[in-house]
Amino acid sequence: MALVRLYEVTKEPRYLELSKVFIDERGKRPYYFDKEHPEEVKKGHENDLRYFYNQAHLPVRQQDEAVGHAVRAVYLYSGMADIARLTEDETLYSSCEKLWDSMANEKMYITGGVGGTHIGEAFSFPYDLPNDTAYAETCASIGLVFFARRMLEIKPDAKYANVMERALYNGILSGMALDGKSFFYVNPLEVLPEASHKDERKFHVKPVRQKWFGCACCPPNLARLVSSIGSYAYTEKEDTLFVHLYMGSELTKKVGDKDANVAITSELPWDGNVEIAVEAKDTDFVLALRIPDWCGGNYTVDGIEKDEMSEKDGYLYVKKAWSEKDVLKLHFPMPLLLMEADEKVREDAGKVAVLRGPIVYCLEEVDNGKDLHLLEVNPDGKYEIKDSEICGNPVKVVEMDGFRVVDTAKKDGELYHVYKRKEKEAVELKFVPYYTWANRGE
């Protein structure tokens, strides 16, 4: 990745050539790792696992499943996408597509987290996504965003930007406290604080953010990403500016010898209203706007005529004779969505995740009392979206009809008893944005 960036700044071919060598040589036999460290060569399955861990089990063009150390993997895949774009290597791009689909469709949490096991900080097998022992390292989600942006540069397809948005607003932002002073390395989806303190299998899962780490890769990586967010919100191709993330911003795009100025005012992630002011008179300039997956393809747009827009791969392309100042107003509905995992995800059987817009929501003890595992949503009940705040930060919360499961057959002191159908008492559930969890104690 660094060599490619150096090449793009200097146009010095040797940097690109060397980066291509790294990609082309990886996974070839005899293995470079074995020649470098012959004393580490082992026999049998253990050695095979070592190659998988380093994504060196096959030449990269033959890899079609995301395996091994999750952060190393997404960095490698990002480099592969860079080379595929710059050399127009279709076989390498095809491998990138397969690896993306393996991650996004079989190995990614609803929050955009990747890396299901703490053993090796690695990808597990397809559909193995445990919630309470998840690793989902902050750096892995950041690397997923790196990969997504590079895939968007090759082919603008909203499936990449949708995942990028999900990871940014959830699995990445959760990695830092609201005051910016403590951090999560691991971003789980289910936490019992007592287990984090007493169960060795869950020692990697922290119930509150930490001030620092022995291996402190995540805090500076977060700072790097947030400070360069503009390069993920937008990409460009020839005469087209792609808007992937709707964030308040201003930018200028060169179109020939003229400037196209774009200013975005956005109410995301809490409401789906976006206003785009364009000054691009006498330019042959196309604006491509992502249609978020969470709006279900339903949206309205004012300020353009029907014959000035078309849809392709999840983007609304606007091509028109621009004036001194055109204003486009978009509205993306934000229905509350109850999301269900594929039935192959055993840990999620009988469970749903609550989403609104790009935000994943969660329940916390501070709002709902202890024993969160006894709570159920009422899919036919009512809900309200309310303005609130957490540690001084304005947020939208979801208040929803639900149930608390009550076991009337159980007697005090009994570990086991004869089964009797459970009763349910009506309760009101309060959901907060996942990225804000654990800011108010364990």
Image: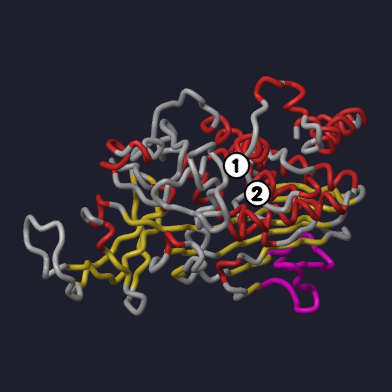
Residues at badges 2 and 1 in contact (C-beta under 8 Å)?
Answer: yes
424 vs 48, left or right, is left
In the image, what residue type sits under mark 1? Answer: Ala
The kind of residue on which mark 2 rests is: Ala
Q: Position of residue 165 (x, y in %)?
A: 59, 54
- Circle 1 sits on which residue? 70
In this view, 247 is above or below 224: below
Residue 203, image x and y in percent?
37, 36
For the record, the magenta segment spans 302-327
The quarter of the displayed image where residue 30 is located: top right
Q: For the residue carrying disc 1, how many other residues have a C-alpha within 10 Å: few (<14), some (14-19), or many (20+)?
A: many
Closest to the observer, 16 or 194: 194
Q: In the drawing, does residue 225 fall left or right of residue 442?
A: right
Membership of 339 in magenta stretch: no
Front-most of residues 160 and 329? 160
User: Quadrant location of the N terminus?
Assistant: top right
Q: Secondary structure at mark 2?
A: loop
**Residue labelled with disc 2:** 66
